[in-house]
Amino acid sequence: MGIALGVILLVILAAGGFFLVRYLNDPLRTLEPFPVGKYMDSYKALAGSKFQGNLRVENDLGWKEGIGRLMVFSFRDDPRPIVVLIPPTLAQIYFTKGQSYQGELEVKEGGLIYANSIRKN
C-alpha cells in the first residue's frame, strides 16, 4: 500500500514538474496580447513591438518565394481581420481555415505584422 501511494505521488510530482517547466520555458508567456484596436487606430505607435496572439485562420492570400506567405487571421477576442506575413522559415506549417494558432507577432515598417514564431493550439 505504501509503495503504491509513493509511486502515485511520484507520478503526480513528475507531471506537475513537466507542466511547470513547459510553462516557464514558453517565450510567449511574457508578451502582451496583440492590441487589435490600437493597431487599427495607429500602427505607428506599435512599430517594433512584439506581442503574442491567439489567431484563427481566415484566409490565405498567397506565397512568394523568398518572402513568405500572407495570411488573414482574426483574434479570439476581436473578430476584425489582420494580415500577417509568415516568413519562409515557417513554411513547413500548413494552414487550414478555422484552425487556431498561437504566435509571436511583431509590427514592422509600414505596419506589416510579421510572425516571428507560430504554433498550432
Image: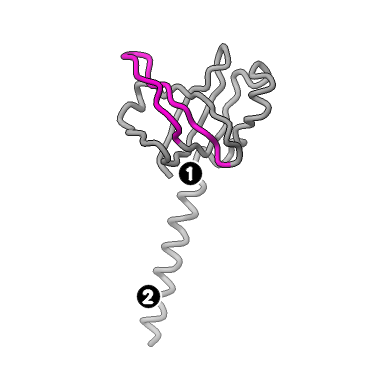
Q: Measured from the top left, where is residue 113 in percent x and y?
A: 52, 22
Q: Are marks 2 and 1 in contact (CB under 8 Å)?
A: no
The secondary structure type at the circle numbered 2 is helix
- Quote the CA–CA distance across marks 2 and 1: 27 Å
The secondary structure type at the circle numbered 1 is loop
In this figure, which residue is indicated by the disc labeled 2? 7
- Disc sitting over residue 25 in the figure: 1
Q: Residues within 10 Å of mark 2 (few under 14, many from 20)?
A: few
Nearer to us in this view, 58 or 114: 58
Tell whether position 9 is magenta: no
Nearer to us in this view, 16 or 74: 74
Q: Measured from the top left, where is residue 105 in percent x and y?
A: 52, 28
Sequence-first tag of 2 and 1: 2
Q: Which residue is drawn at 38% across and 87% down?
A: 1
Nearer to us in this view, 94 or 79: 79
Total labels: the figure holds: 2
Amino acid identity at mark 1: Asn
**Residue 90 image-quadrant placement:** top left
Instruction: Please name the predominant secondary structure of the magenta segment in the image.
Output: strand
Tell whether position 67 is magenta: yes
Query: Which residue range is magenta in the image?
Result: 57-76
